[in-house]
Image (cartoon, grey):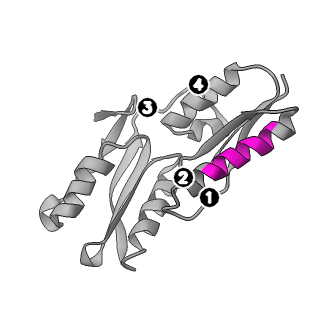
């Protein structure tokens, strides 16, 4: 187990002798130091893709495979990150938040007034205050979508409402 982003994460080792130096470097330096759920996909001809900080293992796999498939059609998951001890005080949809989302969620939850928190499975989120809960939700969804479009490296995933508060 390794301490990653405030959580322990399990990294499945990659057989580095079977891949090129660039792939091994991406795996060791970028991917394996990620947080929460992540995946590393390897394809034919040296193609690869990786993800980290996603809300579920399935979302991490989808993102890594999508990135790898931009170069090769034959990709498979060869490494994964997963939390050893996710937050236990969150329930339902909240329990699937990644490390960074949990921090933002707790900040907006502790605030007062109409507010909302949304997140996407690709690690993006948005939180906002508004005139009422519906207005806050609309603003939070715009923030989440804006985060996704700043660095489009994978297909956009919908921003799902986690919680809204009226007071």
What range is drawn magenta here? 136-146
- Disc 3 on helix, strand or loop? loop
Quadrant for the C terminus in the image = top right
Residue 110: percent from left, percent from top = 68, 19
Residue 160 in view here: no
Q: In which quarter of the image is residue 51?
A: bottom left
Question: Left or right: 42 with respect to 142?
Answer: left
Q: Name the residue under label 2.
A: 122
Residue 64: percent from left, percent from top = 42, 61
Q: Mark 4 points at which residue?
A: 89
Residue at the spot 36% in from the left edge and 43% down from the top edge: 34
Residue at the spot 30% in from the left edge and 72% down from the top edge: 47
C-alpha span from label 4 to label 3:
11 Å
Q: Is residue 143 magenta?
A: yes
**Could you say which is closer to the camera, residue 91 or residue 14?**
14
Callout 2: 10 Å neighbours few (<14), some, many (20+)?
many
Question: Left or right: 158 with respect to 28?
Answer: right
**Whether residue 43 is situated above or below residue 124 in the rendered picture:** below
Q: Name the residue under label 1.
A: 157
Residue 85 numbered tag: 3
Circles 1, 2 touching at the beta carbon (< 8 Å): yes
Dot 2 or dot 4: first in sequence order is 4
């Amino acid at each position: 187990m390794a301490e990653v982003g405030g959580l322990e994460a399990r990294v499945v080792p990659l057989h580095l002798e079977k891949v090129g130096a660039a792939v091994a470097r991406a795996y060791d330096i970028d991917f394996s130091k990620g947080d929460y759920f992540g995946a590393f996909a390897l394809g034919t001809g040296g193609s690869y893709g990786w993800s980290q900080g996603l809300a579920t293992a399935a979302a991490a796999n989808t993102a890594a495979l999508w990135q790898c498939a931009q170069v090769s059609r034959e990709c498979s998951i060869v490494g994964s990150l997963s939390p050893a001890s996710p937050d236990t005080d969150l329930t339902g949809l909240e329990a699937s938040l990644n490390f960074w989302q949990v921090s933002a969620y707790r900040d907006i939850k502790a605030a007062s007034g109409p507010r909302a928190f949304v997140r996407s499975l690709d690690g993006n989120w948005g939180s906002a205050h508004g005139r009422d809960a519906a207005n806050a939700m609309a603003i939070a969804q715009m923030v989440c979508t804006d985060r996704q479009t700043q660095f489009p490296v994978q297909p956009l995933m919908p921003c799902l409402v986690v919680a809204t508060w009226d007071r």
